[in-house]
Structures are given as structure tokens and as C-alpha cells.
Image (spheres, grey):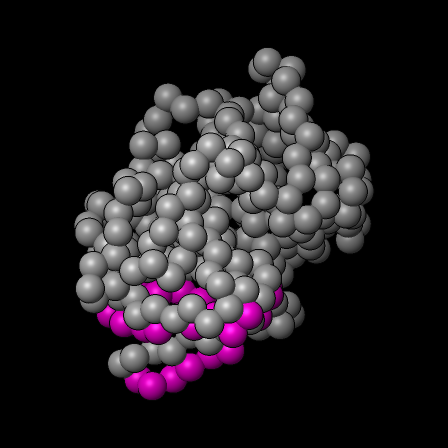
Amino acid sequence: MFIRTLEEVRGTDRYKVLLNGALQSARYLVAADGMGFSLHVNRSKPCPPMTLWYKNHWEANYIISGVINVTDLTTQKTWKLGPGDLYQVGPNDRHYFEVVEEEHHLSIFCPALTGNETHDADGAYSPSGPVPETDQRMFLRRIDEMRAAGKEIMTANGQARVVRALTKSDGLGFSFSDVNLNAGASTVLWYKHHWETNYILSGTGLVEDLNTGESWKLEADMAYNVGPKDRHRLSAHTDLHLASVFCPPLEGNEQHDADGVLEPSGPVPPGPPGY
């Protein structure tokens, strides 16, 4: 089990300042972390549209704040996106990315990036591993619409409300969930068959490693990461809002058993060196 914070990443080669300072990218997870995906926390000021084309990756982007426009250059369809929107692009999706209002978003890549890639003339990153095979094209999921459609479920033995916005059937190599716990909620979890990262969107809480007795206070802009050896307790001091990424991806209908375990859904990545 390990923690990542913005303060820890800033000042290292995982922290990138691009576009003459308009874009800041903190690479909380990279290929070396061995979790099967990489996680970037990005912030950007308004800037001209960028042409991007992830020929060698799938990428999911979850908007936390601000407003962006994304245009599929194949269909010329444009989406205006704000908080709670989740869009996905892959090898077939040459697109424009434009920041309209200062924004904050998460990017998840599979295969995981090494962390030092730069965009080439086509807006692509160099290959970093096998690309998940899927016929999926660029698509959008809106968390509020999914919740209104009845797609929010109770998990963690009744302690968490979850929208599983991306699942194994999407074919991206990871799953993504929007998770909410009420103040006072507490649950013991143990992901024997998965790696999971939880990025704190808002609220405060505590995560405890039940093997070592270590504990960490949780607050916005930090992430905790757990795998097969990490039996732990998650407690919400205030209402707690998390973005959760699993690898292997969840089927989408799993429930935690009495030990806090979810059933297997695929090969488990090795995790960090020495895990």
C-alpha cells in the first residue's frame, strides 16, 4: 500500500509543465508502479486547441472542474464537458482538446506511460506496451446522467454509493468508478485480485493498513493505492468523494464479500518493485 500527493510529485521528473506554463501534469502513477495503468492529475489554463491522437494507448479523462471542448476530427462532433464528465479516446480517435475555462482533470492511460513521453507531431505518445484490443471508438459518459438512470449501486457492504462508469466490457484495460461515502462511513476492504487507486476529489477521511498499523489522513488531491496484500480500512470523516480505478477491470456488478474482497476479473498486474 502506498500514498501519492501533489507535494510528493512536484519537484520530481513526474511533474511536467507544458505549453509555456499553461498546462501542469502531475504523474501520480507511471509504468514503473506496475499497476497496469498510469494516472495523471492535470490542470490547465485556457489555451488554443491541441490536436491529439493516442495511436498507441487508450485514455480516459474525468473532468473535476472547469470547462473543456473535445472534437472528434473523424465525425467533427464536439462535446462541451464539465465536472463529472468522462470521455475516452484511443488509437482511432484523432481529436481536438480545447480548454475553455481553467480546468482540473484526471487522465488514465493503458498501457501505462513511462512518464517522460512527449507528444509527437501527430499528437501521439510513443508505444509503451500492448494496446487493449477493442472496436470501441471515442465516447462520453456523464456520471450525473448515469446516476439519474439508476446506475448507482451500493457496495462495500452498504457503505459506498458507486457509479461504475467504465467496466471490463469497454475494453480499455481498466475500470473507472465514481464513489461517494457519507460522513461516518467505515468499511474493511481487501483487493486480493486487483490493484486499485483512489484519488480524493473532495472530503476528508482515513485509510489504515491493517497489516502494518500505519494510517494516512485523506484529503483532496491525494491518492492511495492498494493491491492483493493490502487489507485496509477506509473511513469517511466528512462526506468523501473518490475517483476509483481498477486493474484488472471490474465486470461492473461485483459486490464485496465479508472480507471486503471482489471476485477475480482477470490477470493481476505485479505492482511496484519489491511488492
Is 68 magenta? The answer is no
Q: Residue at x 55, y 70 (%)?
A: 238
| 44 up-or-down from 171: above or below | below
Q: Residue at x 24, y 70 (%)?
A: 229
User: Depth check: 165 or 6 in front?
Assistant: 165
User: Depth check: 264 or 8 in front?
Assistant: 264
Is residue 270 visible in this depiction of the protein? no
From the viewer's perspective, tell me whether residue 182 is left or right of residue 266: right
**Which quadrant of the view contains residue 186?**
bottom left
Is 224 magenta? The answer is yes
State which quarter of the image contains the N terminus.
bottom left
**The furthest residue to the bottom:** 213
Q: Residue at x 19, y 51 (%)?
A: 263
Give the residues in magenta: 212-238
Residue 110 in the image: state x and y as whole percent: 41, 43
**The furthest residue to the top:** 75
Is residue 133 visible in this depiction of the protein? yes
Residue 213 in the image: state x and y as whole percent: 33, 86
Residue 36 in the image: state x and y as whole percent: 35, 51
